[in-house]
Image (cartoon, rainbow, N blue to C red):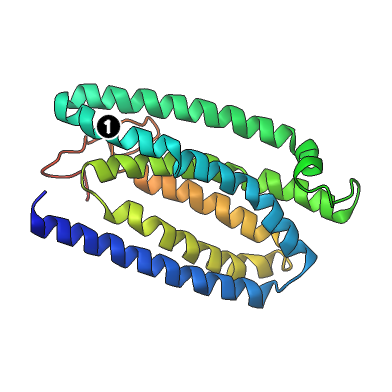
C-alpha cells in the first residue's frame, strides 16, 4: 500500500471513529432524556450484556483477529475462486454456529435470567421484561457478527469506509429508535431492543452487498483489488 493510500485510509478510519464516539455521546444523552434512570433501563442494560458479550467474542474477538490475517495471506497465494470458496465455508460455519447459539438462548431465556440477573424475582415484572428483552436483543449478536465478517473481508481488499461507518449508523439508528419508535410504543424500553436488532441486520446487509460469497446478497460481482465491487 502506497503512502498516500495509507494516509487516506487512516484518515477515513480515524474520522469515522471520531464520529462514532461523538454520536455515541449523543445517543447516551438521548437515552437519559427519553428514558431516564428507571428500572426498565436497568433491565435493558442487564439483558443487553449477553448479546454484547457474544459480539465481542465473535465479531471483535478471537474470530476476527484470526480470520482476517488468514484471508489476507490466502488471497495473496490463491485465485479469486479459491478465496471465494474459503469465504463461503467460513461464513456458512459461522452462520450455522450462531443460529444454534441464538436458538438455544431464545429457548433458555427464562433460565438464563435466573443465572445472569438473580436479583429479578421469577414472576416479577422485571423478570418478565428481562426475558422478553433478551429474546428481542440477542439476534443482534448474530447479525453484527456476520456484518463484522463482511467488514473484515472488505478491509482485506482495502475498503475501509463501510465497516468504519457502521458504528456511526448504529448510534444514529438507536437515537432514531429512542426518539421515534419509543413514543409509538408508549415509551417502552423495548424500542431500543428492536432498534439494535434491526440496525444490526441492516449493517450486515449493507456490508454483505459489497462482496459475492453470500447467497442472500443481491450484488454478485466479485471484489477486485483494482476496481472494487459493483456500485462502490
Q: Position of residue 85 (x, y in %)?
A: 29, 22
Query: Would you say 158 lies left or right of 91 here?
Result: left
Please determine whether, in this image, residue 113 is positioned above or below residue 80. below
Please give the count of numbered marks on the rendered protein. Answer: 1
The residue lying at 29 percent from left, 60 percent from top is 13
Furthest residue toward bottom: 33
Please determine whether, in this image, residue 174 is positioned above or below residue 203. below
Q: Position of residue 9 (x, y in %)?
A: 21, 57
The residue lying at 71 percent from left, 50 percent from top is 133
The residue lying at 35 percent from left, 41 percent from top is 150
Q: Secondary structure at mark 1?
A: helix
Q: Residues within 10 Å of mark 1 (few under 14, many from 20)?
A: some
Q: Which residue in the structure is indicated by mark 1?
A: 71
Name the quadrant containing residue 12: bottom left
Name the quadrant containing residue 138: top right
The residue lying at 43 percent from left, 58 percent from top is 167
Query: Would you say 18 lies left or right of 47 here?
Result: left
**Front residue of this view, candidates 213 and 49:** 49
**Front residue of this view, candidates 11 and 197:** 11
Let me know if residue 212 appears in the view. Answer: no
Let me know if residue 168 appears in the view. Answer: yes
Query: Would you say 182 lies left or right of 203 here?
Result: right
Please determine whether, in this image, residue 44 is positioned above or below residue 146. below
Please determine whether, in this image, residue 2 is positioned above or below residue 90. below
Q: Position of residue 172 (x, y in %)?
A: 48, 66
Amino acid at each position: 500500500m502506497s503512502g498516500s493510500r495509507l494516509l487516506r485510509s487512516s484518515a477515513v478510519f480515524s474520522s469515522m471513529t471520531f464520529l462514532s464516539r461523538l454520536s455515541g455521546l449523543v445517543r447516551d444523552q438521548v437515552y437519559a432524556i427519553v428514558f431516564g434512570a428507571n428500572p426498565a433501563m436497568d433491565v435493558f442494560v442487564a439483558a443487553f450484556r449477553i448479546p454484547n458479550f457474544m459480539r465481542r467474542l465473535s465479531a471483535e474477538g478471537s474470530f476476527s483477529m484470526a480470520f482476517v490475517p488468514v484471508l489476507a495471506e490466502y488471497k495473496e497465494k490463491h485465485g479469486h475462486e479459491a478465496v471465494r470458496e474459503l469465504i463461503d465455508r467460513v461464513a456458512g460455519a459461522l452462520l450455522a454456529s450462531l443460529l444454534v447459539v441464538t436458538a438455544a438462548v431464545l429457548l433458555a431465556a427464562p433460565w438464563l435470567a435466573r443465572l445472569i440477573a438473580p436479583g429479578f424475582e421469577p414472576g416479577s415484572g422485571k423478570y418478565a421484561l428481562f426475558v422478553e428483552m433478551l429474546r428481542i436483543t440477542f439476534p443482534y449478536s448474530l447479525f453484527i457478527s456476520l456484518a463484522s465478517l463482511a467488514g473484515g473481508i472488505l478491509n482485506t481488499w482495502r475498503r475501509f469506509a463501510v465497516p468504519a461507518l457502521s458504528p456511526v449508523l448504529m448510534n444514529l439508528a438507536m437515537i432514531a429508535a429512542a426518539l421515534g419508535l419509543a413514543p409509538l410504543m408508549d415509551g417502552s424500553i423495548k424500542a431500543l431492543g428492536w432498534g439494535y436488532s434491526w440496525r444490526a441486520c441492516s449493517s450486515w446487509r449493507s456490508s454483505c452487498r459489497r462482496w459475492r460469497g453470500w447467497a442472500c446478497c443481491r450484488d454478485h460481482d466479485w471484489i477486485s483489488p483494482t476496481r472494487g465491487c459493483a456500485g462502490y
